[in-house]
Amino acid sequence: MASSTAAADQSSLRVLGVDPGSRVTGFGVVEFEDHRLRFIDCGRIRVADQSFAIRLHTIYTELSAVIRKHRPQVMVVEKVFVAHNAQSALRLGHARGAAMVAATNENVDVEEYTALQVKQAVVGNGKADKAQVQHMIRVLLGLRQAPPSDAADALACGICHIHTWDNAHRLQIGLGGTRSG
């Protein structure tokens, strides 16, 4: 699989952010073009009333459909450090796995960032709360209202990757490189 940086048109990047959960999975699609962020889509995949195996299948199939519809060059998921209990961590890991398999099955690269990195990139404070993330997503993307927290977290993941991608390319150009990857 090609690197997302090499595969992407170097003047734009479309990213699918995913906030996986065993009951609700948020997703958000953002694009960076002409040095501007652009909101494409966001939503929530609700699976709470299904058996666990069906929840994972639903996450996989719904995200696969989002990927086919929006054709992102990369999918970003949050790295998980700590969970309140082992069972929750295991279920979250399964949901992340279903999301990652959906992306790789559609030939989309997967990147991961910590919650601290995502919040730092979007809010400027790695310990920001959900309301602060929602507010900044609304402001950064010019939305009339803040999206639900799951979708806002997913959009934040996408924006974090765009900032990282753009900074890497600016540095490369500043060092005499080209935007070819």
Image (cartoon, grey):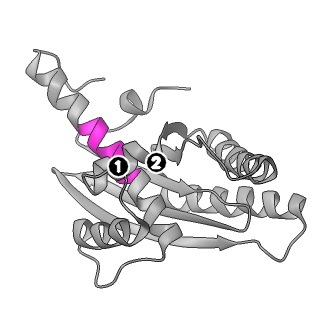
Asked whether the beta carbons under mark 2 and mark 1 sit within 8 Å of each other, the answer is: yes
Q: Is residue 141 above or below residue 102?
A: below
Q: Is residue 47 above or below residue 6?
A: below
Figure quadrant of residue 45: bottom right
| Identity of the residue drawn at 29% across and 48% down | 121
| Identity of the residue drawn at 36% across and 65% down | 133
Depth check: give the residue in front, 148 or 104: 148
Lower position in the chain sequence, tag 2 or tag 1: 2
Residue 142 location in percent, x, y? Answer: 23, 74
Amino acid under disc 1? Gly
Q: Quadrant of the N terminus?
A: top right
Q: Main secondary structure of the magenta part?
A: helix
Look at mark 1 in the image and give the residue it sits on. Answer: 126
Q: Quadrant of the C terminus?
A: top left
Depth check: give the residue in front, 130 or 109: 130
Mark linked to residue 115? 2
Residue 168 location in percent, x, y? Answer: 24, 29
Q: Cα distance, mark 2 to mark 1?
A: 7 Å
Q: Is residue 160 above or below residue 178?
A: below
User: Which residue range is magenta in the image?
Assistant: 158-166
Residue 49 location in percent, x, y? Answer: 83, 77
Amino acid under disc 2? Ala
